[in-house]
Image (cartoon, rainbow, N blue to C red):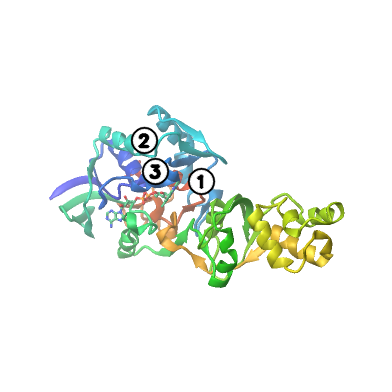
Amino acid sequence: METFDVVVIGAGAAGMMCAIEAGKRGRSVLVIDHAKAPGEKIRISGGGRCNFTNTGASIHNFLSANPKFALSALRRYRPRDFIALVERYGIAYHEKTLGQLFCDGSAKQIITMLLTEMKAAGVTLRLETSVESVAKAVSGFEVSLSSGKVACASLVVASGGKSIPKMGATGLGYDIAKQFGLNIIETRPALVPLTFEAGMLARLTPLSGVALDAVVGHGKTKFQEGMLFTHRGLSGPSILQISSYWREGDEIRVDMAPGVDALAALKTARTATPRQAVATVLATLLPKRVAQVIAEEEAPDKGNIADCSDKVLGRLASAVNAWTFKPVGSEGYRTAEVTLGGVDTEALDSRTLEAKAVPGLFFIGEVVDVTGWLGGYNFQWAWASGWSAGQSV
Ligand code: FDA
């Protein structure tokens, strides 16, 4: 039987980073993946430009049953460490917004960088290889692969979450965790567009394709980024962000004119330009199509702004500054960028990502119950957790 010090399941962001670090420490490392190519999610990330980190990453940008769990790994391997690696490879990048760093060119540059590092560290990569079973051996583990059996002292599960099954996402990591008695925090699609019921969808169909800056809130959590009306419901960064907090039956509140007191603006218009149509006045605060829909919904029988009572202006202003609705669901794993939940952090050592009760077994990246906001945080978690495990395997 072939023997390695370390077997890593999953040639994604976390698995490749872990393999590089373990290889640099002189460990013999095998990385396997059932996909045809490594780092497929890196390739499609950030619209093909990979938002590879966020300069402001801290535990406040992550969701987990234990919000402090990620602290240790995030401190051990920081955004500046990954930026230094990117710079060493001469990969040009820019900050798009809010600390989000993207490649100027292509996400493929990040994959090439990681593959070059793996090669330099002597890592063996086997693609189109699937895992049939995993078993504890007298010392270490025995892994049955489609290519034959391998033995290893350390087994690293870096098989990611369930999002985008078309790209090879499976629940293998959760199954391995359960096999070894580790608890799983319930998983659900996150960073995902939200959908409406048919009636609401029909009313909002004319808005499909309209984008605006909005503050989107759920309880006390708020995000101010772009929002997009789609033919299924709502998308755009602020909606994807809030989807990680939203649960079935909950309300979402949207301010479509952040920083503008719509009621005051409407009252001023009623005095200054009384003959203007309601939709025309609203269009000074919002995209025209949104203004039209709000005017039709909230003031259907009012022609001019002068015809609107304080009560009607109040309704119009609420629709602008505090539109409240209940989504019926999300687009699910088909389009979700990440999976919320995963391997319970209670079962893992926060410094090394090793299972406390199963020496030699490690879980890193998205399979763990640590989920970042949109904006490069999920890759930073993949790099940091992969790096940390790579120091201990
Ligand atoms: P990842 O999913 O990257 O890797 C897991 C690997 O395991 C895959 O290669 C898979 O084929 C393999 N695997 C799974 N099951 C297996 C099995 N049974 N047998 C063998 N191999 C198996 N994040 C961010 O920070 N910035 C961004 O710009 C984006 N953009 C983005 C766009 C889109 C469309 C998506 C879907 C996601 C993002 N993300 C993101 C999220 C980010 O891609 C994600 O969090 C990381 O890729 C997670 O890295 P992992 O290494 O944990 O899993």
What is the x, y in percent for residue 316? 74, 62
Which mark sits nearer the N-terminus, 1 or 2?
2
202 relative to 104, above or below:
below
Q: Is residue 260 visible?
A: yes
- Place residue 166 in its image quadrant: bottom left
Element carrying mark 2: helix
7 relative to 293, above or below:
above
For disc 1, the marked residue is 375
Out of 142 and 57, give the one closest to the viewer: 57
* Left/right of residue 119 with respect to residue 332 in the rendered view: left
Three-letter amino acid code at disc 3?
Ser
Q: Residue at x 40, y 53 (%)?
A: 366
Ligand 1 contact, mark 3 (Cβ < 8 Å): no
Q: Residue at x 82, y 56 (%)?
A: 275
Three-letter amino acid code at disc 1?
Gly
Q: Is residue 169 visible?
A: no
| Mark closer to the observer (1, 3) | 1
- Place residue 203 in its image quadrant: bottom right
What is the x, y in percent for residue 184? 40, 64
For disc 2, the marked residue is 109
For disc 3, the marked residue is 388
* Disc 1 and disc 3 in contact, CB within 8 angstroms: no
What is the x, y in percent for residue 346? 44, 59
Ligand 1 contact, mark 1 (Cβ < 8 Å): yes
Measure the alpha-carbon separation of dots 3 and 2: 23 Å
Q: Residue at x 48, y 34 (%)?
A: 80
Measure the alpha-carbon separation of dots 1 and 3: 22 Å
Q: Residue at x 47, y 41 (%)?
A: 53
